[in-house]
Amino acid sequence: MRDKIITAKEAAAMINDGSSVMVGGFMANGAPEGIMDALVEKDVKELTVICNDGGFGPAFDENGVEVKGPSGAGKLIKNHSVKKLIATHIGLNKQVAEQMNKGEMIVNLIPQGSLAEMVRAGGNGLGGVLTPTGVGTEIEDSELTLQKMTIADKDYLLMAPVKADFAVLGGTVVDKKGNVYYRGTTKNFQTLMATAADTVIVEAEKIVEVGELDPDMVMTPYIFVDYIVVGGDK
């Protein structure tokens, strides 16, 4: 089963300029940091990144010296790898606003629950998500809003299903077949994203033999996982 297990560098080699990429993690919790590093090293550009947030940007001291690097999708943003960001909030990373205001990156903000259901719809082959969330706001004009509808005297927005070329996720324990367990809140968007991409790559904190992972702990079944990266394996 070694054919499923690759390095972060090999994972990054599949993702080319202009790809759409779902990135797991919530405030970088559960993000596949090794794959992020490999994508920065490759210097991939023009990505459309779909994630909960923009990760964390770098931290600087009073002299402007970087004392802590970015995390999660923040690594791609710092590297100017992202052409378009589809996310639910960006306040944790001021570089998002800076690049957006300079016209260097398009930012499409979507309500968090709506985005989760839009990814679910993409993974399940549904035509969209009907929700009252966002009615009367700028969300009505989003490129991901298909139309406004009135049903039984109540207004709704029909939001587009969301899919991507790749999903790069972070799993806590992954067996060699690709069954995945996510610890605690690292689960976040990841189970949904695993269903909604053409190629799914999971970076594992720990990899175990088939049969060692209790079936009751499997949160993403192996049928959704194309490749496994062992955490720290460059």
Image (tube, grey):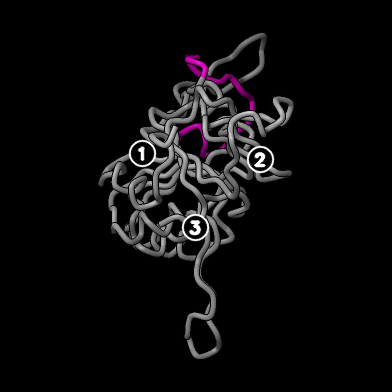
Looking at the rendered image, the disc whose residue lies closer to the viewer, 2 or 3, is: 3
Residue ID for mark 3? 232
Image point (54%, 56%), residue name: 55
Crowding near the residue tagged with mark 3, few <14, some 14–19, many ≥20 C-alpha atoms within 10 Å: few
Q: Which of marks 2 and 3 is nearer the N terminus?
A: 2
| Number of the label disc, if any, that sits on residue 145 | none
Crowding near the residue tagged with mark 2, few <14, some 14–19, many ≥20 C-alpha atoms within 10 Å: many
Labels 3 and 1 touching (C-beta < 8 A)? no
Image point (64%, 33%), residue name: 113
Quarter of the picture containing the N terminus is top left
The amino acid on which the numbered mark 2 sits, given as a three-letter code, is Tyr
Residue 28, image quadrant: bottom right
Q: Earlier in the sequence, mark 1 or mark 2?
A: 1
Looking at the rendered image, the disc whose residue lies closer to the viewer, 3 or 1, is: 3
The amino acid on which the numbered mark 1 sits, given as a three-letter code, is Ser
Residue ID for mark 1? 20
Q: Assess whether residue 132 is covered by the magenta stretch.
A: yes
Q: Is residue 139 above or below residue 46?
A: above
Q: In this view, does 184 lie above or below 60?
A: above
Q: Give the range drawn in magenta.
A: 124-142
Q: In this view, does 43 lie above or below 196?
A: below
Q: Where residue 227 appears, x then y in whole percent?
A: 43, 36
Quarter of the picture containing the C terminus is bottom left
Q: Which of 216 and 40 is in front in this view?
A: 216
Residue ID for mark 2? 182
What distance separates the C-alpha of mark 1 from that of mark 2? 23 Å
Q: Where residue 167 appears, x then y in whole percent?
A: 45, 37
Q: Earlier in the sequence, mark 3 or mark 1?
A: 1
Q: Where residue 51 appears, x then y in whole percent?
A: 51, 44
Q: Considering the numbered disc 2 on the image, is that residue within a helix, a strand or a loop? A: loop
What distance separates the C-alpha of mark 3 from that of mark 1? 24 Å
Q: Assess whether residue 123 is covered by the magenta stretch.
A: no
